[in-house]
């Protein structure tokens, strides 16, 4: 869309001619392209219709100017007259010798391809607003078919693009520079160091510390490590399957073909200097890549250029065909070698290839919703998907109906603090992480784990200078002592992965994996290790649960189940076995029952607040094909990808398992002679 603003002087012939010359040239350029939409507005100092556009006895503005005649002859549309064919209205007023003179000399004209999109036009009286003798002309145009996906464009401007680091191209020297730069930047950050050494910390202090950490790390990484920005944009059209044609030569051939077609259709219209420069640079690039000698485009010999270009274009197409056949042969040989190597190096991939297994991946570029009458609706509009995606995770949106406000007396006893271990076992739980604990937590982290919104991966953290790791350990200690969680830690990304059945374009039928900040998971991993070791050492969790603690294994329940079946078979006893798969297991954990469960194991109040604050009021954005969706605020539940979530799950369900285990009327009895 091209918008031109002008002032057409009433008596300056030279300026008038220059304006007309400019618009004649612009019109010749624009008419080549059907998708160019022009708007011309301003003070034209000219009427269009002598009967409707002037009032009062005046020699001024008696007939249309040369500019108005040019626009009319080239089918431009006067928007006000288009909407009001017989209305007399004026944009300029004056009084001379007590005679009021009014004319319509301010206009908004549009090119003819706007004809079906002009929805409104008016002239508004501005005498009481601006005090000017000119009124304002307004025009409303429907741009739905011209400016598409406006909200997606706005979202691209608002949302920060992802930064992808190319670790494969990072040299050892790059990592050494990154390491030394991290020491320099972090140790000289006075704001960060002053906040870390404060005796007490507020929510704002913790948020600023976190912002300093991610800002410094991101800047050091971008200064020393190869990277690229991946913006949220509409996906490119997929290439044809097995299209092995060289993209560079193919682009040159298409560009030359389009240029030949354009010259053939509009050979009588000369190119501008800028257009000639652009096309000739394109020809030079094609000559270099295809080893051809295509002549430059010249306005003096436009009609003969397509004939001169044709043999070179045929030569380029032949090169494309030869290179495509060679690329196909190379791809086949490479695949044969790769399959042979997989028999030794990657047998899983070899079996998947032989068995023709599908690699399931969810692409969120469409969603299906169902109304109250079970009528499905398919949504493909990017704005609809970004808005609807969070609403499809009903389990995250529902608060748990826990009923702990009216807990029966027998269940109150179950949730009473346990007495089979001393109260002081948690004295060291919230201390600042030691060097050994932090180093061990780093060793357990997978370097291939996807990062959170900040883009800081485990590898970037691992390569930081030891002095920076000391600062990170200090930051973790502050979070332990205060139970204050950085607000940005509560915003995460959801990456849906498929379940064994088809997801049918409904996100509730997928498994949501939460992508959290890696530094957050490191901080939580230390607490998780400490708490798991304490639970194991003091046998805090007595319920028959055999996972989520160091040394846990499924061998024990398998042996118990096997012995129970053998006993029932040998002794002719009745045995009922039930297998249950809990849907949305982590999402079923409510914050109120979780607080009761944590008090039951006599966890210190600050540790309880730390765990609750980690999950309460968490926000999530779903990764779609069009970027991150709108925010989803979870009513309850814990994160699927959090390190401590499995242990929290076991603590949460231990009261129920103990209640079943301690009831003599429940379960299966075995007698050993």
Image (tube, rainbow, N blue to C red):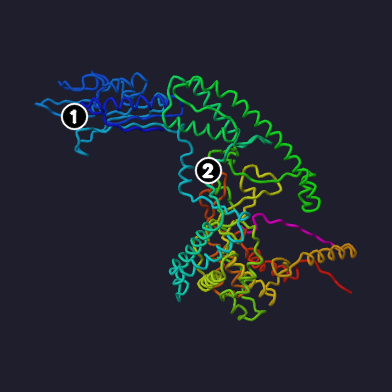
Considering the whole magenta stretch, tell me its main secondary structure.
loop
**Number of the label disc, if any, that sits on residue 638:** none
Magenta highlight on residue 351: no
Image x and y of residue 97, in percent: 9, 26
* Residue at which label 1 appears: 93
Q: Which residues are magenta?
A: 574-586
Badge 1 marks a residue whose secondary structure is: strand
Name the side, left or right, on which 229 lies relative to 562: left
Residue 325: which quarter of the image? top right
Image x and y of residue 161, in percent: 51, 50
Q: CA distance from mark 1 to mark 2?
A: 50 Å
State the residue at coordinates (75%, 57%). 579
Residue 70, can we see it?
yes
Q: Nearer the viewer, residue 69 or 493?
A: 69
* Residue at which label 2 appears: 233
Image x and y of residue 215, in percent: 48, 60
Badge 2 marks a residue whose secondary structure is: loop
Name the side, left or right, on which 540 lies relative to 2: right
The mark nearer the N terminus, 1 or 2, is 1
What is the quadrant of the C terminus in the image? bottom right
Q: Nearer the viewer, residue 385 or 227?
A: 227
Mark 1 surroundings within 10 Å by alpha-carbon count, few (fewer than 14), some (14 through 19), many (20 or more): some
């Amino acid at each position: 869309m091209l918008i031109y603003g002008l002032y057409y002087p009433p008596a300056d012939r030279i300026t008038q001619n220059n304006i007309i010359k400019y618009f004649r040239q612009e019109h010749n350029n624009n008419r080549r392209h059907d998708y160019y939409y022009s708007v011309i507005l301003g003070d034209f100092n000219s009427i269009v219709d002598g009967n409707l556009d002037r009032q009062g006895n005046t020699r001024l503005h008696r007939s249309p100017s040369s500019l108005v005649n040019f626009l009319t002859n080239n089918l431009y549309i006067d928007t006000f007259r288009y909407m009001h064919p017989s209305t007399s209205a004026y944009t300029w007023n004056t009084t001379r010798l007590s005679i009021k003179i009014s004319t319509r000399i301010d206009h908004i004209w549009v090119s003819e391809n706007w004809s079906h999109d002009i929805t409104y036009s008016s002239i508004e009286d501005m005498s009481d607003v601006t005090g000017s003798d000119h009124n304002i002309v307004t025009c409303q145009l429907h741009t739905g078919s011209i400016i598409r996906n406006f909200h997606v464009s706005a979202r691209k401007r608002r949302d920060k693009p992802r930064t992808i680091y190319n670790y494969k191209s990072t040299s050892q020297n790059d990592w050494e520079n990154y390491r030394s730069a991290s020491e320099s930047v972090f140790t000289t950050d006075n704001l960060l160091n002053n906040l870390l050494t404060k005796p007490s910390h507020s929510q704002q202090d913790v948020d600023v510390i976190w912002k300093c950490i991610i800002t410094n790390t991101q800047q050091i990484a971008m200064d020393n490590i190869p990277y690229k920005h991946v913006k949220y944009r509409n996906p490119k059209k997929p290439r044809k399957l097995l299209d092995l044609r060289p993209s560079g030569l193919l682009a040159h051939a298409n560009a030359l073909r389009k240029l030949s077609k354009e010259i053939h259709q509009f050979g009588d219209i000369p190119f501008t200097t800028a257009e000639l420069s652009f096309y000739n640079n394109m020809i030079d690039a094609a000559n270099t890549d295809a080893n051809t000698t295509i002549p430059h485009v010249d306005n003096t010999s436009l009609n003969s250029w397509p004939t001169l270009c044709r043999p070179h274009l045929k030569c380029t197409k032949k090169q494309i065909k030869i290179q495509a056949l060679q690329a196909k042969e190379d791809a086949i040989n490479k695949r044969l070698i790769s399959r042979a190597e997989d028999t030794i190096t990657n047998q899983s991939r070899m079996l998947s290839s032989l068995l023709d297994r599908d690699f399931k991946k969810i692409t969120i570029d469409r969603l299906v919703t169902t109304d109250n009458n079970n009528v499905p609706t398919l949504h493909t509009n990017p704005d609809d998907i970004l808005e609807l995606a969070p609403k499809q995770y009903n389990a995250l949106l529902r608060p748990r109906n826990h009923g702990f406000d009216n807990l029966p007396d027998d269940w109150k006893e179950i949730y009473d603090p346990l007495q089979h271990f001393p109260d002081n076992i948690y004295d060291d739980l919230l201390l600042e992480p030691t060097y050994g604990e932090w180093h061990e937590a780093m060793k357990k982290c997978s370097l291939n784990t996807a990062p959170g919104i900040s883009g800081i991966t485990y590898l970037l953290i691992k390569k930081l200078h030891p002095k920076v790791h000391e600062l990170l350990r200090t930051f973790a200690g502050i979070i332990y002592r205060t139970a204050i969680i950085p607000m940005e830690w509560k915003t995460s990304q959801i990456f849906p992965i498929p379940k064994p059945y088809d997801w049918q374009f409904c996100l509730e039928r997928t498994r949501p994996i939460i992508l959290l900040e890696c530094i957050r998971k490191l901080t939580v991993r230390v607490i998780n290790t400490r708490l798991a070791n304490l639970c194991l050492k003091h046998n805090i969790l007595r319920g028959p649960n055999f996972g989520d603690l160091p040394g846990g294994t499924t061998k024990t329940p398998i042996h118990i189940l096997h012995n129970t079946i053998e006993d029932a078979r040998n002794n002719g006893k009745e045995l009922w076995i039930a297998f249950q798969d809990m849907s949305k297991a982590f999402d079923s954990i409510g914050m109120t029952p979780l607080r009761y469960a944590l008090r039951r194991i006599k966890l210190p109040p600050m540790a309880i607040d730390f765990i609750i604050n980690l999950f309460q009021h968490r926000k999530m954005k779903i990764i779609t094909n069009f970027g991150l969706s709108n925010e989803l605020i979870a009513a309850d539940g814990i994160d699927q990808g959090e390190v401590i979530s499995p242990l929290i799950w076991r603590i949460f369900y231990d009261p129920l398992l103990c209640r079943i285990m301690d009831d003599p009327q429940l379960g299966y009895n075995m007698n050993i002679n």
